[in-house]
Every structure is written in structure tokens, then in C-alpha cells.
Amino acid sequence: MGGTKLAAAVVEPDGTIATRAVVPTPVSPDAQTVAAALDGLVREVAERGPSRRLVGLGVGSAGPLDPLAGTVSPVNITAWRDFGILDALRDVLPGRPAVLAGDGHCMALGEHWRGGYGDRSVLGIVVSTGVGGGLVIGGRVHSGGTGNAGHIGHIVVDLGGPDCACGGRGCVEALSSGPAIARWAVEQGWSPGDRPADARALADAARAGDPVARRAFDRAALALAAGIVSAAALIDLDDVVIGGGVSGAGDVLFDPLRAAVAELAGLPFVTRVRIHPSTLGGDAGLLGAAALAMEAARA
């Protein structure tokens, strides 16, 4: 569940996605409007699958969240504040476990499971409407004391930077999310013509050589690199896997990102971190959420 879209799938034990569906996240101040869209989506997918074989429900959401209470307060879904998402969905699969984790955790776990990272320490980053993250260390999600560890989008990388929706200032998300990148470019004089002024149009402009669009992605990559280098120094990471809609910009993002990481990193154990685009795309979060549900069912 994110600020742009809601996705659901039935996942087999080997990681095969049997059926899936996606809908836009409703833009509404009413919590139940957003919840109704999610409930309808999940029920539609569950009914397409063999419901008697479904062992549990895994939910990945933008944060912050409280996995024990089953509540979410996504920065980019303003209708939900301490919203009881697990309680709202339990009736879909009554009597079976329902677990909640951050969308970044689910993305990281999905990439780790299907990407062959073995015992390597992985930071997954989702760059989209916001910037989320999650950690897999020793083959297991590292969720921290409140379930919000790995939230790289809210590492401060610019002390004089723009305000962030989280209430902080100068966060990675405030400089590197899709809306932030496009907003800065428009402020610098970029125009998308007859297209929406979003990160996708900006990436196309950057690939075509537009200087403002290129500077916008360079600026975003530098902020993201600062967060990655800080995380690598703190956690001793092996790999960083980047997904989300903005990662679709490809080399326009990844070339300046790798260059900025190389420039900012100093210590040998920090410079060894490897940056990868997601190999699973939007499936990574679904697979990670399913892996958590399967684990809960086995417990």
C-alpha cells in the first residue's frame, strides 16, 4: 500500500504469483474511502485464488506503522492516521494469521528471497511518491523496536533543505521522491509540455538531454547517495536494491547515484556497497509480504 497505488496478489510457496490486481490509491481525506478500495481489491484477488489453500495475509504499507497494534500512519496517505489496517482486513481470511510490515521491508525481503542474496545484508529502497526502505540482515527482516527500522527516506541529508511531509527537514524523501524531483525541476523552469509534470516525464526529458531535468536527477541522486553512504557506514551493508516508480528512470538515476556514492564514501567497508536496480519491480513488495504471511502460518 502506497501513496500512488494499492496492489494485491496470491503467491504460491515457490514465489510464483498466481493472480494479482492493482488500483490507484484514492485521493480522499476519508479513511474509510481508502480502506474500502483496499478491501475490495484484496477480496477480488482472494476470490480468484483457491481460498481454501490461502494460509495467511501479509500486508506491506508505507510508514510509519505499528506492526504489533496493526496500525498505519503513512506520510503519503494522509487519510490514515493510526488506522487499524489489520483489523480492517482480517475478515478476508478469518482464522488465519495476518501480519503487517513496512513496504520497504517487504520489498527488501522479496528481493532477498528471489534475488539470490544469500546471507548478505541488504537495504531495499522504494523511490516513488515517498522514499521507503527496509533491511534484511542474516536472511531476516530487521524491523527494529517499533517496526520502522530502515526508514532511509527520513535520514537527514541537507541541514538547510526543504521541509518534509514527516515534519522534519532536509530528509532524503524531501529531495529524492518523485514529486520532489519534479517540483524542483518546475521551480527551475522545466516544463513538460502537454504531459503531467511528474518524474516519468522528467526522466524522458533527461534522457533527451534537457539540462534542467538532468540537474534534477543529479540533485536527487546526490541526496539518495548521502543516505546510502550513511546507512552503509552504520550497518556495514553488502547490497542496496532500489525499486519504485522513480527507479524506472534507469541510467538517468543510477549513473549519477553510483558516481555520488563513490564520491561520498571513504572507508573501505563503505565503498564496497553495491547498488542494484530491482529485478522484481512491483512484485518485490508482494513477494515479501507473502513470505511474512507464510512464515506466520508455519509458526
Image (cartoon, helix red, strand yellow):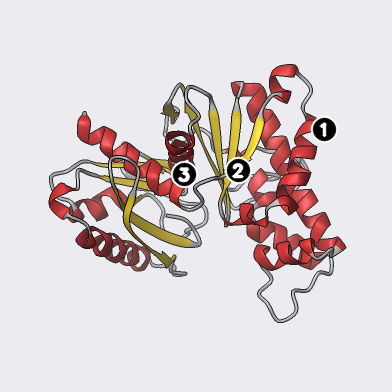
Most foreground residue, 27 or 22: 22
**Secondary structure state at the residue bearing disc 1:** helix
Residue at figure coordinates x 60%, y 25% from the top left: 238
How far across and down, in percent of the image, does residue 164 sit?
64, 50
Per the image, the residue denoted by label 1 is 263
Q: Which amino acid does label 1 sit on?
A: Glu
Residue 231 location in percent, x, y? 63, 29
Binning the other alpha carbons within 10 Å of mark 2 as few (below 14), some (14 to 19) or many (20 upward) gives many
Q: Which mark is residue 64?
A: 3
- N-term mark: 1 or 3: 3
- Mark nearer the N terminus (3 vs 2): 3
Q: For mark 3, give the secondary structure.
A: loop
Left/right placement of residue 260 relative to residue 25 reads: right
Cβ atoms under marks 3 and 2 closer than 8 Å? no
What is the quadrant of the C terminus in the image? Answer: top left
Q: Does residue 212 lie above or below 112 as drawn?
A: below
Q: Which of marks 1 and 3 is in front?
A: 1
- Please say if the residues under marks 1 and 3 sit with CB atoms less than 8 Å apart: no
Which amino acid type is shown beneath numbered disc 3? Pro
Taking the spot 20% from the left edge, 62% from the top edge, the residue there is 47
- Residue indicated by mark 2: 153
* Outermost right residue: 211
Task: From the viewer's perspective, tell me whether residue 58 is left or right of residue 174.
Answer: left
The amino acid on which the numbered mark 2 sits, given as a three-letter code, is Gly
Callout in the foreground (1, 2): 1
Observer able to see residue 162: no
Q: Which of pointers 1 and 2 lies earlier in the amino acid sequence?
A: 2
| Cα–Cα gap, marks 1 and 2 | 20 Å
